[in-house]
Amino acid sequence: MNIFKSLRMFFDNFTILLFVMVILASLLPVQGQAAIVFNHGTDIAIALLFFLHGAKLSREAIGQGITHWRLHLFIFAATFMLFPVLGLIFRPIFEPFLTPTLYLGILYICVLPSTVQSSIAFTSVARGNVAAAICSASLSNILGMFLTPVLVGLLINAEANQQDVDSSKAALSIVLMLLVPFVLGQLCRSKVFPVIQRYPVMVKVVDQGSILLVVYAAFSEAINEGLWQQVSGSILLALVIICCILLAIVMIGLTYASRALGFNKEDEITIVFCGSKKTLASGLPMAKILFVGHPIGMLILPLILFHQIQLVVCGILAARYARRQEKPAITE
């Protein structure tokens, strides 16, 4: 029982369900006409997800945090510049341990926007600047709908053996599938938000359910193409280690850089959590659009692993920040 409780500290129900989807796809992959219907269903679920995200986002919270432009620029630079640069710099070290597609998955992690819910949650637990976290994480996701396709195109075009991505076409598809529902959600917020408050379980089901559907569909396609014949145990271990190294470098770098630039402790916390995290909720739908024709199951495997690692590390770090802040001040 103690072992089970310890495991639950690191693996929440949603994470467990993610791995269940991978196992289910490995045993019972969706195929043929059923796969086409299933993919259309995931598109509808994703559009509904971003509609609800738009309806949830508070304009007042954005107004509160948006004035802290120096902090936001620093976080955006970490998200859309530092991560991609690290992905390219470490290519000679990372790529020999991975397949070309898995390395592409690492690069894809590097160009994704920040998370929203977990970045805000961890900032709150650590007693950071929550208003700034709400603003930064939300704007990061909106900007990511445009910047991620461009960065994916640039990074893939830099790879001699990879098929080019039409970033303009991909950006248009992302706008139609993600941004348009998001904007509609904002426009309908006055009517939809009270319903969301009354039935929070509905939002959770759509939020997590749409991601689970994408994971199942993507891994079904990968299994049909022989995923586990291409990814050995040693490659999987190397992938986990690489994700840990990437996250550690960014988190340590942001911690010391924020202090060197004179940010206070609350802002440092916001920078570390918003600048180091990568979104699974937006990353999976965008991968579905951006990498048509690629083995998407193998490509999103690094993102799923990175997602779990960042949750565990940020959970431990948030508790540490909170404990340190709880220490009473020494008085004369």
Image (cartoon, rainbow, N blue to C red):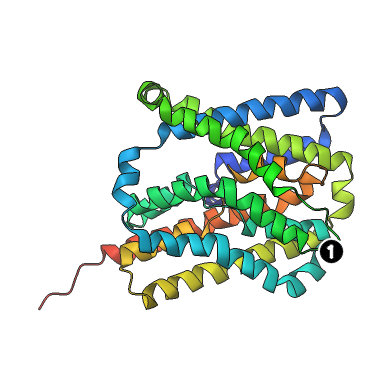
Looking at the image, which residue is at 47% across and 69% down?
Answer: 254
Rendered view: 61 above or below 107: above
Looking at the image, which residue is at 58% across and 48% down?
Answer: 146
x and y, in percent, of residue 188 in the image: 42, 24
Which residue does the numbered mark 1 point to in the structure image? Answer: 160
Q: Is residue 63 left or right of residue 286?
A: left
Quadrant location of residue 35?
Answer: top right
Rendered view: 93 above or below 73: below
Quadrant containing the C terminus is bottom left
Q: Amino acid at mark 1?
A: Ala
Element under label 1?
loop
Q: Residue furthest left?
A: 332
Looking at the image, which residue is at 39% across and 27% down?
Answer: 189
Q: Residue furthest front?
A: 168
x and y, in percent, of residue 33 in the image: 85, 23
Q: Is residue 176 left or right of residue 128?
A: right
